[in-house]
Structure formats: C-alpha cells, structure tokens
Amino acid sequence: MSGNAPAPALTILGRQTAMELRLSLRRGESLLLTLVIPLVLLAFFSAVKVDGAGVQFLVPGVLALAVMSTAFTGQAIATGFERSYGVLARLGTTPLTRPVLLTAKTLGVVAVEVVQAALLVGLGYVLGWHPHGNPAPALLLLVLGTAAFSGLGLLMAGTLRAEGTLAAANGVYLVLLLLGGIVFPLTALPHVVRSIAQQLPAAALSHGLRASLGQGSLPGHDVLVLAVWAVAGIALAARSFRWQA
Amino acid sequence: MTVRVRGLVKAYGSLRAVDGLDLDAAAGAVTAVLGPNGAGKTSTVEICEGLRTADGGEVAVLGLRPGSRALRHRVGVMPQQPGGYPGARCAEMLRLVASYFADPLDPAALLDRLGLTEVARTSFRRLSGGQRQRLSLAMAVVGRPEVVFLDEPTAGLDVQARAETWQLVRDLRAEGACVLLTTHDMGEATELADHVVVVDHGRVRAAGTVAELTAGAGSVRFRSTPGLDTGRLAVAGARVSEPEPGRYVVTAATVSPALVADVTAWAAAQGAMPDDLQVGRDLEDVFLELTGRDLRA
C-alpha cells in the first residue's frame, strides 16, 4: 500500500465551507432566528412607530441583531450539537486541520451575514431608510461584532452540554435583544441598567452602526467595547474549547 | 512496527485506566485488543488515534507522534462514537471526508458495499445505530489509510453487517494495512486477528496468535439442563463449572477420550443430555481464566 496524500488545503477549505453553508441553510429554526425575526422586527417596529425609533434607528439595530443571531446564537447551537454528535472529535483525526475548520465556520457565518445584510438593507430602503455615513467604519464594526459574538458562541458551545448551549444561547439572545438598543433606544431603560447595557457587545454594535451609518463617525467607546469582548471571548474559547463532548 | 506502544499510562483521577501497557501492531496484519468492559481498550486506542493524550509511556504510529499532521492522511479512525454532522446526509458526510484526500476510494461504491445506498440521502441524525456505525467504518477507510484503528467495529451490528465488516477488514489486511481493533467479542478476535492482546485492568495479560493463546490445558464444553450436580464428577484433576445456567465447562490438565466418556456418563447418570459437546479450549476459556469470571461494573 503506497499511502495517500491530503487534498490541497484550499480544496479542503472550499468543500468544508460549502458543507457549513448547506448545513446552515437546512436548519429551519436557525433561519427563523437569523432571517425571519430581524426582517419582521424591522417591518413591525417601523410600522408601529415607537418614540425615537423610526426606520433610521431600526436598520442599524436589526443589522446588529442579525450579526448576533448568526455569529453567536446560531453558531453556538450548531457547534454545541456537532460536538455532542462527536463530529468535531472525529474530523480532528482526518486531514481537516483546526485552522481550516474554524476558517470554514467563519466563512459560513460571513456568507449568511451578507445575505442578512442584503435583505435588511433592501427592506430598509423600501421603508425609507437614508444612510448618511461612510461604509468603512460600519464594516469595521461588523467585523469586530462578528469576532466578539463568534468567540462568545464558541466559548459556550465548547464548554456546556448541547442542551445547555441551546437554552443559554436563546436566553442571551433575548436579553441582548432587549438591552441592545436594537428596537428601542437605551434611553428608555433605567439609568443603572443602561450603563451596564452600554458595556455589552449588542449595544456597542448597534450604537456604533447607528453613528457610522447616520453621521459617518466611528465612536471609540463602541470599538473598544467590541474589541475587548472579541479578544476575551476568542481567548477564553481557545483555552477552554473541548472538541469531545 | 507500525504501531508501537511502550509503558503506556492513562489515569482518570485516581483510576489508572491504562497502567504500563505494551503493544505492537504490524503492517499487513490484524491486531485485536481484547478485554472486558473498562479494561482500558478504548483509552489505549484513543491515545494511538491522537484523540486523547497519554499520562506516561511512549506511542509511535508509523514512527510519528499520534495525531500529528504528517500522520492524519495515513491513518483511518473509527471511534466508538460514530460521529457525523447531524444535518448532513449519509453520502454527503462520506463525500466530505473523501474530499480531504488526494486520491480517495469511490464513496458511492463504498456505500454500496456497506449496504448504505438506500439511506444515502438520509440525514445522519435519522440513521440507525448500525447504519451510523457502517458509515463510520466507511469514513475510516475512504482515504485508503495505511493504519486503521477500529474501536469495537461490530458492536451492535446484525449478522450480515458484521460479516461484511469482517470481509472489509480482511481486504484491508490483504492490501497491506495495519489494522488495530478493539473488541470484547471472542468470535471476532478468533475470526479476524493475526495477533491478540488480552488486556485487563490496563495491563496486557497475554499476547499471541489465537493458536498460541489456546494451546495447553484443555476443556470439554456442553449445554444441558441447568443445575446439574457439579460435585458428583469424580475424575482426578478435572473440575466442572457452570459459568451460566445450562452451560458447563470441564477443565483438566489433559483432555483424554476417557475424560470425555466420564463426562458423558456423569451427565447420563443425572438423566441429562450433553448438547453441543465440544472438546478443546477456545479463546473464551483463555479469556475467562485471565480476566476472571466476576461481572464488571
């Protein structure tokens, strides 16, 4: 027996990313969370007109929610079940390396986010949204937000049982939806709650996107909050992730 | 040696699951690690696969550290838990693993051979335990590995699937692969293994070919009415036991025609028919002698 050779790393990355995407598109419950809920929230709240929360306010908010639902909630739940089904440990014995696996996961998340952004921005324009900013700071915030939420999602998926991850990821999603300045402004919250919420990644992302897409500015505090969550989340996930459930 | 293990130690808290184990597995041969539940078989093989780290000792697979990148495309692994993406279809999962290799086997042909064509489009989460296990075997061999680790490959399989699995293992051996499998099934070890390593309490109790292990003292085995009076067989040096109701084993230093006559006469005196009477010693006798007859937790 002459033995085999691994396929080129780029071929493996392509096949693995395609697999991640097909799996994402097949998860109906995750599509509800990533696509349907943000679109429905945007349409509903722009129709009912909460004070200070018109379409100019809502589009950056639901974009932040979309990032959170894909990079954090969806990725945490899917990865938690992959771990409990033993697939991650199993693929760890094949020529699929961990960097390639994690890159494929990230590309899968980014691809879903591109679809989300296209749909939400499209609906936003239909509803009369007029961005005034510069897309570059918004892009930086989206990347930082994706990194922060991915780190936290993988931290959860890599340490809790799959059922625990399912419950916790949905719970955190709800809390961050309410405390994230997503469909109503943080000013509606009591002062103490508001000052805590401003240090959380959801509010930093929605506030930062609102500033960059509304005035073209890049608020340093939001960038800092997201960067700290990203570094801490990814470092903790890398340290504690257990591939075998 | 293709797989070489020396003085392997693996501890979980205060339990030394593997306690100074030595093992060799050669190319072109099937090596079976045989032992009762909790003997340390899976820990040993998972360390060889790179899924677990050892607490002591040396392990080399093709001269390399287990799990190292230079090894991944040369080794096929079938872990005890047959892992797959819950939402991936059976054929999709196998094609994915095949795509990691430059020159894999044809996934469709492999599915056909293992009787999985009918469930090729079924998602992994809906496959039965036996189907997942066969897919897992396919995933282990699709990259045409030089070394194959199979952790209890036929546990829970039906007779046909087991026979096909055994044939596949024989083919791997014929192509020159080193196959290391764990089992607690004596029949499987007898049927397949060129080399058997009996493990208990994390140590090797005996190693050799089946013929070497079963040489020596003999036994007479048969089935009959449960509860025969085992005290009444009066043959010098022979002892009757009933390891499970209705199954009798007579052990003696040598098995002579006279012993067989005495045993059948003893049964006849109690009005019992000795069914399935077998003379000689099989791997199970050796195994029970080495590992004891107590039930393990």
Image (cartoon, grey):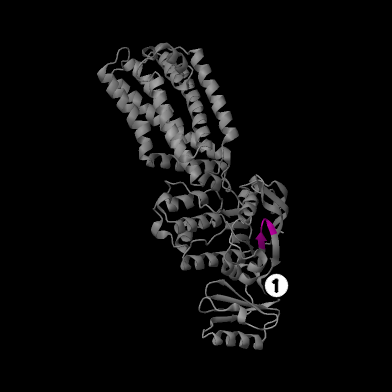
- Depth check, front residue: B200 or B8: B200
**Mark 1 belongs to which amino acid?**
Glu
Which image quarter is the N terminus of chain A in? bottom right
- x then y, percent, for residue B165: 52, 64
Residue at which label 1 appears: B212
Question: Percent position (x, y) of residue B222?
Answer: 56, 79
Image height check: is B37 above or below A55? Answer: below
User: Residue at point 31% right, 15% down?
Assistant: A54
Secondary element at image label 1: helix
Magenta stretch holds residue B200: yes
Please give left or right for residue B286 compared with residue B88 in the image. Answer: right
Please tell me whether residue B25 belongs to the stretch shown in magenta: no
Q: Position of residue A200 (x, y in %)?
A: 47, 20
> Splitting the image into 4 quarters, where does residue B205 fall?
bottom right
* Span of residues in magenta: B198-203
The image shows residue B231, relative to residue A162, as above or below, that is below
Identify the subunit bearing mark 1. B
Residue that lies at the very extreme toward the left in this rendered image: A47
Residue at the image position 38 percent from the left and 39 percent from the top: A25
Quarter of image, res B166: bottom right
Question: Are there few (<14), some (14-19), or many (20+) residues within 10 Å of tag 1?
Answer: few
User: Does residue B12 lie above or below A171 as drawn?
Assistant: below
Is B291 left or right of A109, judged from the image as shown? right
Where is residue B27 drawn, in percent x and y? 67, 62
